[in-house]
Amino acid sequence: MTKGLKAWTDRLRKQEMPVLGDVIAELNKITGSDDADVNQLAEVILRDPNLTSQVLRIANSVFYNYNKVQINTVSRAIVLIGLKGVRAICISLLVMESLLGDNPQERLLKLVAQGFHAATQARNLVETVDEKAAEEAFIAGLLFNLGEMAFWASEAANADHPGLFSDNAQERRAAMEDVLGTSFKSITRELAKHWKLGETLEQALYPKSERSQKVNAVIVGERLSRAALYGWSSPQVKKVLREVMEYTGQDAEHALLMVKEGADQAAEVALSYGVSEACPLIPTSQKLSAESPREPPSKMLKGDAMVQLNILRDLSTATVDKVDVNTIFQMVLEGMHRGIGLERVAFAFIDKHKLKARYVLGESTEQWRSNFLIDIGPYSDNVFTQAIETGGCHWYTAETIAAKPQLYNTEISRIIGKFPSMVGVLQVDNRKVGLFYADRWTFGGKISEDQFESFKHFNSQAQVSLNILKSKH
């Protein structure tokens, strides 16, 4: 069993993420020299087609491409953003790719979401005093919990020890000592040293009383990312907000507005980095504090035919552009939500006898990713087993629910309620693989015939995309 700082650092570097260290070393060598060459960095990036497309996507995002002039080459991206900026993008992308894999643990996704939130807040803070330090602050914020992220991404991750999840610092330290023989923070520091991730990260992990504005921004950003999980009006946020006010010189109202906008940006940043799974886990400004009940907005969501059309067009070309299946599911959900005007939408995978939500969108759906786990075994009879058995798209009206109350048993009612809804099943060959669920929740909106037709269009396009992607593998 792996135990101790050196053992864990060696294992994570050499066994779990060996290629990552080599690429980071090469990036550091190029960007660290005084006569660094744009073409050298471009060559390293262009060796990996996936990295190339991701770098260009981020370079064209609103966070870098202020002029909105399409950047089509890596060389142009380096010229506009700078060597260190593109290096930070590459390292962030490579670390995320190495950590997440195909089926990341829930704990890992939460840490990644927290990392993007901390990174965005740190970058926004330091930009108020030193724009040149923005990218180093971003990468330090993103990788502040690298040791813990790497642990949960490893094959040795032990989810059975409750102390590792504890909010109590003493319990958590004891659990780390028991499981690891060291601390997550120590592992992060050692990995940061080996991979030369920057002094800012190392100094933020173990800060001195006298520290730079750059380091301070990382520390405050990381604290904000944790405090926001308790709600924007929580005592935890108010405490960190005082540090933001001191850092920026703003009053409480403007400081709160700044950090809320930062949270919204963080979700967009995670999406631009291709980590769509982290987006719902970032506490955006629309989320209410945990202690205050959520009140549904009085205004019903309205569909937009043009949004529907544009997203359907994008979906039809997505497979040609080699967009991955997870992005396609996200696009479909956005089309159903924004385009059709359906307040709550989800895509759930069929995993043997369980139905598990993977992607969700809309009011009150934040908890679905963890609690939308429904029994669809051979002895179950509910709205989902019925849809899966027959396949295709289904519209469950208020009349259907009243006539067949058994379809919405206690388990399902607790998770999604009893609302008129639509379900669309996807299959590969003859195997049912997942389904879309959509309803209008408590807003008073009724599902129309047109909406059901549009729902079927999106489900059908997702099915076509899935078939094309399968044929290419």
Image (tube, grey):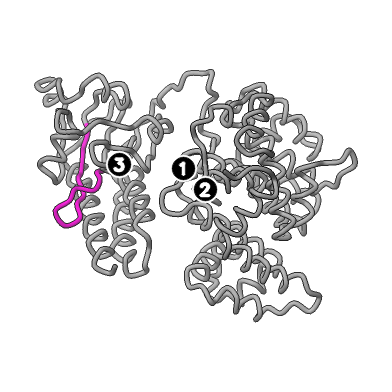
Asked if residue 432 lies in the magenta stretch, the reply is yes
Kindly identify which residue carries mark 2.
Answer: 153
Give the residue at x 73% y 56%: 136
CA gap between label 3 and label 1 equals 16 Å
Q: Please state, as top left, top right, bottom left or bottom right, where the N terminus lies in the image.
A: top right
On the rendered structure, is 431 left or right of 200? left
Q: Secondary structure at mark 2?
A: helix
For marks 3 and 1 on the same chain, the one whose residue lies earlier in the sequence: 1
On the rendered structure, is 209 left or right of 170? right
Q: Which residues are magenta?
A: 421-435
Q: Is residue 250 above or below residue 238?
A: below
Q: Closer to the camera, 254 or 161?
A: 161
Q: Position of residue 337 (x, y in %)?
A: 34, 42
On the rendered structure, is 447 left or right of 6? left
Kindly identify which residue carries mark 3.
Answer: 348
Amino acid type, residue under disc 3 in the picture = Ala
Packing grade of label 2 (10 A; few <14, some 14-19, many >=20) is many
Give the residue at x 68% y 46%: 187
Amino acid type, residue under disc 1 in the picture = Gln
CB under 8 Å between discs 1 and 2? yes
Q: Secondary structure at mark 3?
A: strand
Q: Please state, as top left, top right, bottom left or bottom right, where the C terminus lies in the image.
A: bottom left
For marks 2 and 3 on the same chain, the one whose residue lies earlier in the sequence: 2
Q: Position of residue 201 (x, y in %)?
A: 74, 50
Kindly identify which residue carries mark 1.
Answer: 105
Q: Position of residue 58 (x, y in %)?
A: 55, 62
For marks 1 and 2 on the same chain, the one whose residue lies earlier in the sequence: 1
The overriding secondary structure of the stretch rendered in magenta is strand
Give the residue at x 27% y 42%: 351
Amino acid type, residue under disc 2 in the picture = Ala
Packing grade of label 1 (10 A; few <14, some 14-19, many >=20) is some
Q: Is residue 323 above or below residue 205?
A: below
